Every structure is written in C-alpha cells, then in structure tokens.
Amino acid sequence: MERPLFELPGIPVRDRCAVMGILNVTPDSFSDGGRWRDPGRAVEHGLQLAAMGADVVDVGGESTRPGACRIPAEDELARVLPVVRALARQGVPVSIDTMRARVAQAAVDAGARIVNDVSGGLADRAMARTVARSGVPFVVMHWRGQSRAMDELADYDDVVTEVVGEVRCRMDALVSAGMDPQQIVVDPGLGFAKGRRDDWTLLASLDAWAALGRPLLVGPSRKRFLGELLSDPATGEFRPARERDAATAATAALAAAQGAWAVRVHEVGAVADAVRVEAALRAHRRTSI
Ligand code: PMM
C-alpha cells in the first residue's frame, strides 16, 4: 500500500512508519507497571528509547489496563510533568498519554508536542477545546468506556466498519468543537473494548482507515491477543507480557506495510529495525513488469 506523507506540527516527516516509544510512569500498567515510577529513572529510560530509535516518546501517568480505576488529576500531574519537562528540554519529541484536558494543557506547556487521548476526547468534555487552542496533534483512539468495565463493551457485528465509523463520528464532533482536522491522528484502540478476534480483524484491515484521510497510529505492544496467540501449548497459559516483544515487532512491520503512520511500542530497538525493513522492501518494489 502507498504511504501518504503526513505533516504534523513538531513531528519530523519520515518515509517510513514512525516509532512511538512507551514510557508509563505508573505503578500498575499491565506490562511495565512500577518500572519507571521514579522520575529520574523514567527520564533516563525515555532518553534510551529515543537513542534506540523512538521518533516520539509517549509519557503516561494513568494505567488504562483492563479493570484499572481512575486516579486523581493531581497524582497524574505529579507523575508526568517532571518527566515531560526533562525530556522536552533535551530535545526529545514527547507525547502525553492522558484523558484529562488539564493534564494535556500542563504537559503541552511543559513541552509535549502531541496529546494522545485513549478516549478520543470523550472522557473530558474540555479536551477538544483545550487541544484545539494548543494546535498540537491529537490522537483520537477508538474507545467505548472506562477501563474498569470496557471488556463488557466489546460487542460488534462488523468490527472494522463500526470502529472506523465511531472514530469518524468523534472526528466530526472534535472539528465541530473547533479542532483543525489537520491536528487529528486516528487509532483503532487495540485491546480497548475489543475481543481478541476483534483485535486480529482490525489488524488485518488497517487499509480501511485510509478512508478517513488521517495518519493512523497502532498500539499492539505486548497486548492480550498476542499473549493468547503465543500461549503455552501444554498449559494454555498466556505468554507473559514481557515475552511478547518479538511478536510485537512482527505486528509492527505488518501494520507499517498496511500504511500505518506510527506504531506505539515498549521495546523500541527491534521495532525501529522492523519498520526500516518494511520501508526498504517498499522502496524496492517493482512498479511495473
Ligand atoms: N494502549 C495503551 C495505552 N495508550 N494509546 C494509544 N494511542 N493507542 C493504544 O493502543 C494505547 C494507548 C495501553 O497499553 P500500555 O498500558 O502498555 O501503555
């Protein structure tokens, strides 16, 4: 599939799929909870992600794993702001993973260049106007409800059509609230109100997102559908989250081949290589026989 070149303010244009490195400054994220809780270690890890090839580092202070409960805004701010500020000062392009307008605004003031909202602006009514005013790119992920109960919302007749359609509705609402369509990045929200079959079906049909005309971010990293695929054949136990990185890299290359603008991953090194392989292959494809 041809790769359209999208220009997003503050983000370098690449002829390959971009890599967004995950930096969860949380005690309880599903695969790296607690590891980067100390701000000094978090900043060090963010710099490592950039050195390994992350084009953007996505800083999050609130876990969205299935079943997770919300935390107070003050706690979220205290977790993310020192890390965003320190990374931005050192020239790392940072995105802020938050559902709160207040956190998004404070992070942008501290140097964040992208707002990544897993709720696509649904969790906080002030988000659309806040991001519209700031002018930074905004990730509109497909979302049907808070993590606490999202698994119960995974009910689809035609998951691809419904998920793309629901994101299109969000885009329309955001534009009505004042957002420039050029700010919008879309994301299918793998694992969010999705059954495992839904995740696979969405991943197999990423070309459907081209109809929205906006850059596509995909977040497969270490998610349940990969754990299930790689289950222990003897016990049926899911492969542990930290042992899903090779499968994540394969998934990233396949998403890139379907035109994804960026992939959001924990283990950046292998994925940075994988998206370069995909780009090289595309560059060498024969255009006529
Ligand atoms: N997944 C998680 C968190 N934030 N943001 C976007 N845009 N897309 C995702 O798929 C996504 C996200 C959950 O994964 P994590 O807990 O490992 O960060």
Image (spheres, grey):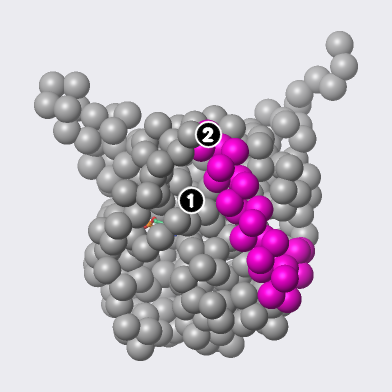
* Label 2 CB less than 8 angstroms from ligand 1: no
Q: Is residue 248 above or below residue 286?
A: below
- Please tell me whether residue 168 belongs to the stretch shown in magenta: yes
Query: Toward the viewer: 123 or 9?
Result: 123
Secondary structure beneath dot 2 equals loop
Task: Name the amino acid type tagged 1.
Answer: Gly
Stretch of the chain drawn in magenta: 158-183
Position of 134 with respect to 241 (left or right) is right
Which corner quadrant of the image does residue 46 belong to? bottom left
Q: Dot 1 surroundings within 10 Å: few (below 14), some, or many (20 or more)?
A: many
State the residue at coordinates (45%, 46%). Answer: 190
Image quadrant, ligand 1: bottom left
Position of 120 with respect to 215 (left or right) is left
Residue 163 placement (x, y as % from top left): 55, 45
Q: Quadrant of the C terminus?
A: top right
Q: How many marks?
A: 2
Point out which mark residue 189 bears: 1
State the residue at coordinates (50%, 44%). Answer: 271
Q: Dot 2 surroundings within 10 Å: few (below 14), some, or many (20 or more)?
A: few
* Label 1 CB less than 8 angstroms from ligand 1: yes
Q: Quadrant of the N terminus?
A: top right
State the residue at coordinates (51%, 68%). Answer: 122
Residue 199 placement (x, y as % from top left): 44, 38
